[in-house]
Amino acid sequence: MENYAGTSAVPETAAVESEAAIPARLLPVAELHLHIEGTLQPELIFALAERNGITLPYSHIDELRQRYEFTDLQSFLDLYYANMAVLQTEEDFAAMTHAYLERAAASGVRHAEIMMDPQAHLSRGIPLETCVNGVASVLATSREDFGISTMLIAAFLRDLPEESALEVLDGLLAMDAPIGAIGLDSAEVGNPPAKFERLYARARGAGLRLTAHAGEEGPASYITEALDVLKVERIDHGIRCMDDPDLVERLVQERIPLTVCPLSNVRLRAVDTLADHPLPAMLAAGLNVSVNSDDPAYFGGYVDDNFTQLQAVFELSDFDRARLAANSIHSSFASEERKAELLEELNGGDATP
Ligand code: ADE
Ligand code: ZN
């Protein structure tokens, strides 16, 4: 396995220390690509359904689990949106968020930027306040309760019209929702980034940070469009950039973060097997990639599971793992002070064994 010491994926100001100095341990990481609704575990789905008097179309947990066989992104999205029916009250959103943070802390996550899909709740008659306040109530004390600093990202559904997204963004701004960024998710192919040019301009004007899914199932040109038209700072997924060498060169030059989700890509058949995943090639190309879980309850694992399985297939060195962790911290929207703290922890300070 190649050693990435010579690549530009980590700025010199906070370079990872020498390979020998990095012990094998659970690394402190930032999780940058996580849909909170994708953390709903089957057990919690059943518990919330019972609490809310909702009849699920599955008679027991195993029957639900049997549906976790996806053929593509849309086949997953159908189940993901259907299961959201159990989220009715602020307490439900809070319970889901609490469960994620507890599990994430055990994965080494020290900073999490968490996407939520408000439109998927509004369309079910759940007010913006219910979903935002439920999640935000837990994030407000995440640092004290779990050792995880957090940011809430409002993600917009790209298969809906831009007018809907604009209306929801205005609602979030009017209620002074504690969001730090916006994202763009849901069915990618046929819904190019340029469809949301006004949304991103408005969010940028409101001082929000910008990210968007691009190049998951959609073509490399969607990545270029997200950068040039939406002016995003980060790309979620981005694996299809490997189809376009000129784009790879640009992403390396501009140090654009790509929040890669290996187990998600396998489960949604963006790649055939983990062994076929482009992550090692992306690292070798000098791309600024991080490892994330996307929808961990549906894709067979949290961040630590992603690292463990990558390690098993690609024999990542400690140095590779530390570089991925450092990339995640540098690519976050955390304050410079928080980033410095996490980098210090990564470089041998304080990490949990
Ligand atoms: N929403 C939740 N997970 C997603 C993914 N992997 N791609 C697009 N939209 C999503
Ligand atoms: Zn995603």
Image: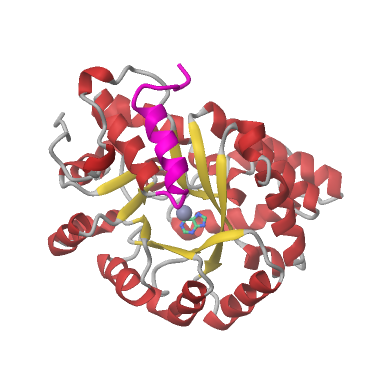
Res 93 visible: yes
Q: What is the image's colouring?
A: secondary structure
Where 107 falls versus 116 (above or below)? above
Q: Position of residue 177 (x, y in %)?
A: 67, 63
Where 183 falls versus 262 (above or below)? below
User: Which of the pair 199/343 is nearer the observer?
Assistant: 343
The reply, left or right, for residue 112 in relation to residue 176 is left
Residue at 59% x, 49% y is: 36
| Magenta run includes residue 284 | no
Q: Position of residue 173 (x, y in %)?
A: 64, 71
The reply, left or right, for residue 211 in relation to residue 63 is left
Q: Position of residue 45 (x, y in %)?
A: 71, 43
- Image quadrant where one finds the N terminus: top left
The reply, left or right, for residue 135 in relation to residue 3 is right
Where 331 falls versus 341 (above or below)? below
- Image quadrant where one finds the C terminus: top left
Q: Position of residue 255 (x, y in %)?
A: 25, 55
Residue at 38% x, 34% y is: 343
Residue at 39% x, 45% y is: 261
User: Which of the pair 182/306 is nearer the observer?
Assistant: 182
Residue 180: image quadrant is bottom right
Q: Which residues are magenta?
A: 332-353
Where 134 falls versus 309 (above or below)? below
Residue 169: image quadrant is bottom right
| Magenta run includes residue 334 | yes
Res 59 visible: no
User: Which of the pair 236/81 is nearer the observer?
Assistant: 236
Residue 149: image quadrant is top right
Q: How many marks are shown on the rendered structure?
A: 0
User: Which of the pair 87/349 is nearer the observer?
Assistant: 349
